[in-house]
Amino acid sequence: MRSDVLELLREAGGCISGEKIAERLGVTRAAVWKKIAALREAGYDIASAPRSGYVLRSAPDRLIEAEIAKDLGTVLVGKKIICYDAVDSTNLVLKQLAHEGAEDGTVVVADRQGTGRGRMERPFFSPPGKGIWVSILLRPTFLPQDAPKCTLMAAVAVARAMEHFGLRAAIKWPNDILHEGRKLVGILTEMSAEMDRVNYVVIGIGINVNIARKDFPEDLRDTATSLMQMKGEPLPRVAFLQELLRALDALYREVQSDGFAPVLAAWRTYAVTLGQTVRVIG
């Protein structure tokens, strides 16, 4: 019901009485008051006045379902969004949900990860309130050999979200996005498949959004950076995540209908390692 109260506050565009909210939702005024208190606890600035009611002044830049889903407008990616304050790993959580039958496009977001990791089991620094730590579940129709290309698809989606905020991405093969040689974004794609069928793909994306240089561990300060450092000012995490999900939704639907060729062409426009020698460690 908390999201229902929030929607009524937004819909009102000004004051709305507790009595009217209770009437619209078919609950008691005491129940409304509890939900208002919960919204305030979550960071919403809700003013109240006797005989006038409640008014929503501002919403927090917190990665919570009600904010991410608001005006998202996607078709597949983000149909279901599950948010956590903290998890060990969003990929681990979503893989378990996938085994339990979670639907195509399910998104898991955490404000903090305890054991986030990248390729080759490298740890990924995931502090609270500073980044976007998200995993997306796909149940595609393409063959297992095409699944690794989902990493490239995710990188293009991040690049397009960055462009929305006036930032140019530089993609380093196969799964990092850099700025001036320092890491902004890491992507980890995992798959469950049979010989000729993909059961699911989980794409984990870690984005350093509003992390100051001093906030990184000392051993990462020269190799990692953030969108805030790149932009010169903090970015709204909710809005950035929405742009990412919109971009990924469009790309995924394009892949399902037309294959990966358009995604690969887009990826090449951002790639900084084309024509360079790369070392593969297996």
Image (tube, rainbow, N blue to C red):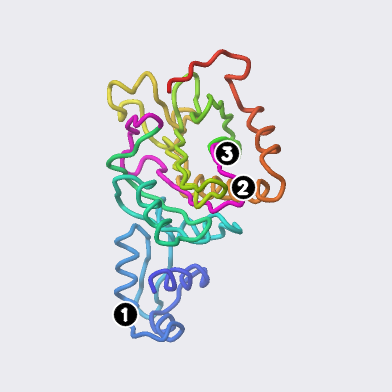
Across and down, in percent, residue 247 comes to: 60, 46
Secondary structure beneath label 1? helix
Which mark's residue is nearer the viewer, 3 or 1? 3
Secondary structure beneath label 3? helix
Task: Name the foreground residue: 68 vs 250.
Answer: 250
Q: Which residues are magenta?
A: 119-148
The N terminus - image quarter: bottom left
Q: Which residue is mark 2?
A: 142
Across and down, in percent, residue 250 comes to: 64, 49
Rendered image quadrant of residue 82:
bottom left
Find out whether residue 137 is within the magenta segment. Answer: yes
Task: Name the foreground residue: 122 vs 230.
Answer: 122
Rendered image quadrant of residue 100:
bottom left
Find out whether residue 73 is within the magenta segment. Answer: no
Quick check: 127 left or right of 207? left
Residue type pointed to by label 3? Gln
Q: Which residue is mark 1?
A: 31
Disc ID at residue 152: none
Q: Which residue is mark 3?
A: 145
Task: Name the foreground residue: 256 vs 209.
Answer: 256
Q: Does residue 62 show up?
A: no
Quick check: 139 left or right of 97? right
Give the alpha-carbon distance from disc 3 to disc 1, as whole Å: 52 Å
Crowdedness of circle 3 by 10 Å Cα count: few (<14), some, many (20+)? Answer: few
